[in-house]
Every structure is written in C-alpha cells, then in structure tokens.
Image (tube, coloured by chain):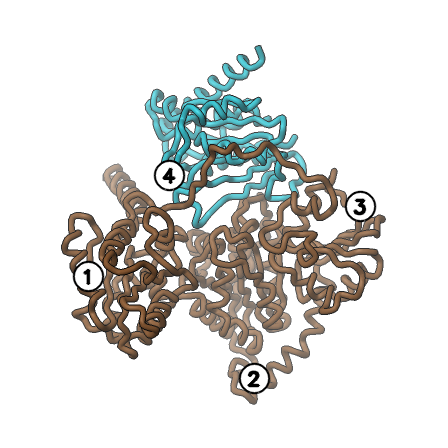
Amino acid sequence: MQKLLLLGDEAIAQGGIDAGMSGIYAYPGTPSTEITEYVMHSKEAKSLNITAAWGANEKTAMETALGMSYAGKRAMVCMKHVGLNVAADAFVNSAITGANGGLIVVAADDPSMHSSQNEQDSRFFGKFALMPILEPGNQQEAYDMVHYGFELSEKFRIPVLMRITTRLAHSRSGVERREIRKQNDLKLPENLKQFILLPANARRQYKHLLSNQSAFIDSSEKSPFNYLIDNPDKKLGIIACGLAYNYLIENFEDHHVPHPVLRIGQYPVPEQMINNLYESCDTILVLEDGAPLIEELLRGLLNKGKTIKGRLDGTVPRDGELNPNIVAVAMGMTDTRGRDIPSLVTSRPPSLCKGCPHIYSYNALNEALSEFYKGRVFSDIGCYTLGALEPFDAINSCVDMGASITMAKGAADAGLLPSVAVIGDSTFTHSGMTGLLDAVNANSSITVMILDNGTTGMTGGQDSAAVGKIENICEALGVHKDHIRILNPLQKYHEENLAIMKEEIAYQGVSVIIPRRECIQTLTRRMREEKKKQATEKAEA
Amino acid sequence: MKKDIILAGVGGQGILSIAATIGTAALNAGLHLKQAEVHGMSQRGGDVQSNLRISDRDIASDLIPFGKADMIISVEPMESLRYLPMLSPEGWLITNTKPYINIRNYPEMDKLLAEIESQPRHISLDADEIARELGSPKSANMVILGAASPFLDIEYKELQEAIRNIFRKKGDDVIQVNLDALQAGRDVAEKQIKLSLK
C-alpha cells in the first residue's frame, strides 16, 4: 500500500480505523484532538460505521469506550494528559474490571508545557493502574501499535494505555497501512459479573490483575517494540524510551551508536532485558521524555549500585522535552548552536483573535470591577485564559477544568466578596456544572460569567456540548432565573451590559452572566463554507 | 541529500501551506520527510515554527538540532531572527520583509531590516507587495517559497507540480496565480544571489 503522510495523532486514528475499531470517544485537548477529528472526517470511517464522538468530558468518554468494550467491540478513548486526571476514576477501575473487546486509552502528554498547565507523565498513571503501556517512537510505530495494542488488550482482557507526547502527536511522516481488519461482532463478556466491582468481586478481579503482572512483563520481554541494539563499547549502556531513541541516533554518523542501546516501547518494564544491560555495562544512561520513571526504578531509594545517569543526577535537565542537543550533551558530545537571537527580537505571546467576543467581555468585566481592589477573578481552561495577559490582566487563576466556579465559592466562603468566576461554555458542561450546584446549595455570593462562544475554541472549534442549554442548566441547578443574565458582548450595548454586570456582582447570592456571541474562528469558517455551498448550488442550478 | 528547514511566522499566517508544498514535492521525488508542527495555544497570534526535514535517507529526529538547519524560511521579518540559534553557520535566511505587528513593542523597522541585512547569507523581499502586484495578495507565502526554491535541492518543476496538486480543486486560475507567485519569488532570489556573488 502507498505511504500516507500523517501526524502521529492521525497515524493512531488510521490505525484504529484499520484495526477494526468500532468507536472512538474523546474530549478535545492539545495535543490529542486530531486523533478523533481525523476519524470524524474520514470517509472510510463513515462507510465502516465507526462511531466518533466528543463526550462532555474525558470521564464520560472513557466510560463510553469501556461500555463499548463490554459489548465486545474494539474502542478507543483519547485525551490530553491532564484529561486522564479527569477520567482517572474510570481509568484505574477499568484495569480491575478488565476489557472485553479491545480497549486502548490514548493519553497525549505535553512535556515542556507547549499548551498545558503541567507536564505530568502518563506512564506513571499506567503503572499505578497496573496496566500495560505502549509508547511509540515514530509515526509508523504509532500506527502499528494500535493493531498490536488491540490484540494485547483482547489477549489479556485488559485496557492498554498508549502514551504519546506533543512532538509525535504533531509531527508528520510517512506511514504504511495494513489491510483493514473486520470489526468484532457484538459479544457480551463470558462472565457477566466481570464488570461488577462490588467488594467481593473487585477483590477477586484485583487479584486476577495482580497475578497477570508477570504475564504483562513477559509480554514486554518479547515485545517487538522492546529490543537491544548491541554494540561493543560497554563503558556505557543506554536505555532510550519512545522518541528519545531518535534524538540519540540523530547525533551519530549513519545513526550508529557505539554503545549498547535498549529501546523501550512497551511497559511494564522488561526486567530481564534491563538486567542484562545493567550487568554488561559499567554505567547506565536513561533517556526518557517526561519524568524519570525507569531511572527511578533503576536507582532505587538508596542508589547503591552502578552509576545511573539521567534526569535525577542532572545529566539531563529535570524538566522539559528532550531534543537532539540535550541528548548530545548527556553523551558528553559538543553542543551545537547557531548565532544568538538579536536583542531587538521581542516575545510574541499568543493573543485573543481580532473580533473575539472575549475581548469585549474582559474589558467590560474589568470596568465593572474597577471599584474593588484586584485579585478576585477565578478563571478556567480555554482561549479566555489569555485574559491573564496584557492588555487585560483580568484574571487571577487557571488551575483545572471547572476550578473557576469552585475556587470562587471557596474564596467567597473565606470572605472575599465579590468573588467572580469566568468559564467557557464547553468547560462549563465539562466540569463546571457540579461546582455551580455546590454554590447554589450554599447560597454563595458569587458571580459566574459563562463566556458562551458556542464552541470548544482553543482546540480549534469542536462542537460544544453546552450549545443551547446553558441557561436551562443553570436554572435547573437552582440559580434564580432573575439572576441568569444574557448579554450581547458588543461595544454598542456597553451601557446596558455594564449595568447588568454591576447589578449581578452586587447581588448576594449565585448569579450567572452569559455573554453570548459566536467564536470569530468558527464564524469565519461557517461563512466560508456557506459561500462555497451557495456557489455550488448556483452552479448546479 | 538532506535539507533541514525551519519555517517561521505568526500563528494564522499559514506557514503550513509552504510546508505542505515542499512536503508534496519531496514525497513525489521519493524523499523521506519529517515535519514537526505547532498546534494549540501558540496558534493564536503567537510566534510559530515548523521543523521540516527532507532527506534521501532515513530521518531520525522530528526536531532539527540547534545550529544544523540549512535554512530559515520566514513569512515575517522579526520571526526570521528568532530562530538564528537553529541555523548552521553556512545556512541561508530567506524572509519576508513585511512585518506583522500585533504587539506593542515591535522593533523599529530600519533596525530590524539592518539586522537582517547583516546576516551573511540571506534573501529578503516584500512578498506581500509582490503578491499584490500579481493581483493575488493571498499568495505571498508562495512568493516566499519561490525565493527559497533555489536552495531546496528539489527540482523546480516538482514544486510546480506540487502546487498544481494542492490547488487542483480550486481551479486553473488559482493554480496559475500561485505558479506566478512562485516564479516571482524565485526571480528575486536569483537576482539577490547573483549580487551577493559579485
């Protein structure tokens, strides 16, 4: 078959389509979004009747995928690394229920925090849940590992975590496809109690998971993605996980490293392979993108064995993404660098788009709050987090999805009045609703501004689960309808808008302000598509 | 053959259209390719870059090592300088001179242009102006690609073919405009190369 030029994300999606996946579920999050989008836009996936859907959040997506696995079909669920925190309850327990149809959980990590609030390493989550983990080192492996991962999942009846990083997710390369495998038939679990985690059952299932660990390790020892490239200079042995291998060989002529290299792409770590390398070499260097998982295991608490180099001893920086230069320095090779950046080059941070409704909303909010001292606006995750930057300087927090409302409540409980939350429409239905219920039940004096642009903006304009429902949700949660105020965030309505904001900020109780205007990006895209459609209709007529 | 290219610009300027054209041409020429892109937060009007690597052999890293890039192709003058640490001592800087000003403290234009002029191997041109003269302001990126084309080690006709492929659905007029833009950029570059050799 002809090679396709695919992003790592797209390779995973195409792998799913070709490996007989019946459904893919996700909540958008950089750098994972393109996996699900690819399946949504694929004509092939449509013709194969593959379900591709955004969930309200990662937890609902994870559970839906688990339900499809229960019914015997292959399912995938995709999220960014912090999304796995949201899905964690379902994720950790899914290792105990096990899978029926193959289930792959894709977590896309973001070392260096290109578009995230932390750089947590999802491999720790997989290890914590006692689940096998796959970590592709290139786009072809990303594709192949989906086929392999579904088989692994069905062989051991266990979900498999696939851990990628931004660099692979958003880098393109040639990928060779395989024949399309038929989807599984509907088939219930052999034991209809497998998914009932009542204590008595759960204890049995957990023991089963524990007893399977040696089989998982054995599978890692024999995995096509774990292998030793033996070389004569045994002064140093190198363990290279995922993409780190590429950065390593980049530094050598013909990609030939003089030292033995153990390449890791499947976990739990292959103990025997690592032991063999350790025994045969004087010193070990561990190269892993993310946190020092293997390095910590090798060093142990007391670090009394051979010298282990890596992120913990400073051979490699403790944080941030790897690159060829970092690995060169770790290998004791000379660093390379071009000329310095001239001093006249200034930083150019991201900013809200021209015409973005949030620009008006923040300017108006700043004005409405101008009589109070600063430091009382709790915000959330989305384009509007850019309200933290100049010229707005309008917000004081951004922690996790939904935290704006609950933090505002906590601060109000502490006596910070007024206390304001700013959250987007999609983030509100993701994780804001429950917090609003807490605030209503406590009759907290907070004002929640739900910036409704009708889309999940930051990740490129995916459908928002909140569209057309926000005021009904707020009212149903118990916010008094007189204090649910919808604004048109345009300068021409400023006087009226400002008065409403001031009123609701002064109100002693939960109030909700909804500035509503479509995202300028989705609006532009919609207009373009409509124009195109009209042109075709005209041509046809 | 190996070309390591940094594409630079501001989010929304469409540097990926240049990458797509080079990528299509490289694949048709039977070359290997890796291309690291930037998606997500920085796309919103912030600085963006893409690492594009083409080679007749296997490519290891998705990222180009610092100091090893063969060229920087930039659609914005200040952004072209941001990636100088990536450029090899023999590398070329090919940049648009039309600034994209969305920040308060954008440097003074004469100083910025003087900095670009002080780079040992560079091509600079107002691609927006050239594209406007051709009656197609949207094809400035193809002008820049044309200006980079003498350094790519990909046959010019492969680039032309790639443009025909990419814009096929948009009709012959759009294809022709982009081909003209490519040629106009190439003409400017060739003139500047000749001058620098004198």
Front-most of residues A28 and B154:
A28
**Disc 4 vs disc 2: which is toward the camera?**
4
Rendered-image quadrant of the C terminus of chain B: top right
Residue A202 numbered tag: 2
Position of B75 relative to A86 (above/below): above
Q: Is residue A531 left or right of residue B109?
A: left
Q: Amino acid at mark 3?
A: Pro
Rendered-image quadrant of the N terminus of chain B: top right
**For numbered disc 1, what is the local secondary structure?**
helix
Tags 4 and 2 on a common chain:
no
**Residue B108: image x %, image y %?**
40, 28
- Name of the residue lying farthest toward the bottom: A200
Residue A483 numbered tag: none
Query: What shade does chain B have?
Result: cyan
Badge 1 density bin: few <14, some 14–19, many ≥20, Cα 10 Å: some
**Disc 3 vs disc 1: which is toward the camera?**
1
Whichever of callouts 3 and 1 sits on the residue coming sooner in the sequence is: 3
Q: Which chain is brown?
A: A
Tags 3 and 1 on a common chain:
yes
Marks 2/1: CA distance? 53 Å
Position of A240 relative to A73 (above/below): above
Q: Is residue A353 left or right of residue A153?
A: left
Residue A502 numbered tag: 1
